[in-house]
Amino acid sequence: MKLALVKSLILKYDQLKKAIFWVALMLGSLIILSSCNGQKNSQSLSKNTEKASMLGKVVSELDSVIWSIFQDKNDNFWFGSKENGLFYYNGQQLRHFSKKDGLISNEIRGIQEDSSGNIYIETMNGINQFDGKSFKTLEIKEAASSTSEWMLNSEDLWFKIGYTNKGPYRYDGKYLHYLEFPKSPQEDEFFRQNPKASFSPYGLYLIYKDPNGFIWFGTSSVGLCRYNGKSIQWHYEEQLQKTLSGGDFGIRSIFQDKEENFWFNNSRHRYEILTTKSKHSDTLNYKKKNGIGFINNDKQTEFPYFLSITQDNDGDLWMVTYQNGVWRNTGKKLVHYPVKDGKTDVLLFSIFKDNQGGLWLGTQNAGVFKYNGKSFEKFNFK
């Protein structure tokens, strides 16, 4: 009896050891398999990260001619050169992208971001989308009519490509749709005065989306217009369009302030856009108000045209001129900020307010400048 019991216990012990062995073997296989998969995923992620980090090249400074400035949702900065590609700055490293990296053109004219975080680069030859890894050129949808795709969706993006078209491009998330403006009331007068014009008077300098979601367009020679989702209405005034020397300045600045007044090109007047219909269905109905028409009360110097405008967190308007620095409109007076690079006068092109309320300048000859609370100083990326 005792011998039989001992043999039975030995047999059960051997069976238990075998079971433990096979369980351990299976667990070991699973661990090895999981480790291999993890290594593969890690290697794949590493390759993607490496691929993204290898795109473009690290540089120590920007191009001297920067027309576009943008900060994305992750607080990274993007700078567009007039003809030398795109720059990216994450706070630590400055990187340069060009046609070699997938840009359709090195002539950058605007930068935007969609709700998914994709970056869109507006160039003279087309639109690029950057998804964090590579640049893709957006496809333009061929349409039987360039007037049938006008619509207003909050997620759509709007672009201008070159200066020869007669309208903008609307991006619906899949295709670019070319849209042609209806005839401007100023068109016939333009061609009467310029019968041999070699450029389109509808060429776009600016696309602006107001707080109501309406889209505004600033043209080279026929004024500005607004699309409210139902109709396109025009506005033209010679004092907004013509320089003192007689040439067309074009509509380069459109901005709605916190009091819902619009500013176009200069500070002489503010415009309240009325909801009632005007005498002509294709023109805007508005009420013109006094702005600040002179630089100072001593010399009574007429305020020049400005190229770009923004509003700071305190409600003051900041306006950029090409050769005469920056002007701050407090609502009661204009404060002048000359901008110099050493002893050289800086030629300005654009102003941008970042996510923290900081003010940046894009220039024609000196890279970018940032407001330090007292003046604008050149930003050092080193």
Image (cartoon, helix red, strand yellow):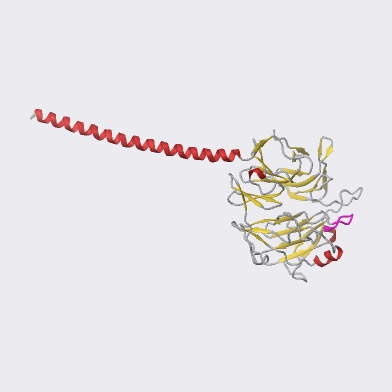
Let me know if residue 355 appears in the view: no
Extreme residue in the left direction: 1
Residue drawn where x is 77% and y is 71% of the image? 280
Predominant SS along the magenta part: loop
Question: Is 54 on the left or on the right of 41, as rendered?
Answer: right
The C terminus sits in image quarter? top right
Residue 246 highlighted magenta (yes or no): yes
Question: Is 197 on the left or on the right of 121, as rendered?
Answer: right
Let me know if residue 50 appears in the view: yes
Magenta span: 241-247
Extreme residue in the bottom direction: 279
Residue drawn where x is 67% and y is 58% of the image? 169
Residue drawn where x is 84% and y is 62% of the image? 196
Q: Name the foreground residue: 251 vs 374.
A: 251
Q: Name the foreground residue: 13 vs 169.
A: 169
The N terminus sits in image quarter? top left
Residue 342 highlighted magenta (yes or no): no
Residue 311 on image: x %, y %: 73, 49
In which image quadrant can residue 37 be found? Answer: top left
Question: Is 60 on the left or on the right of 334, as rendered?
Answer: left
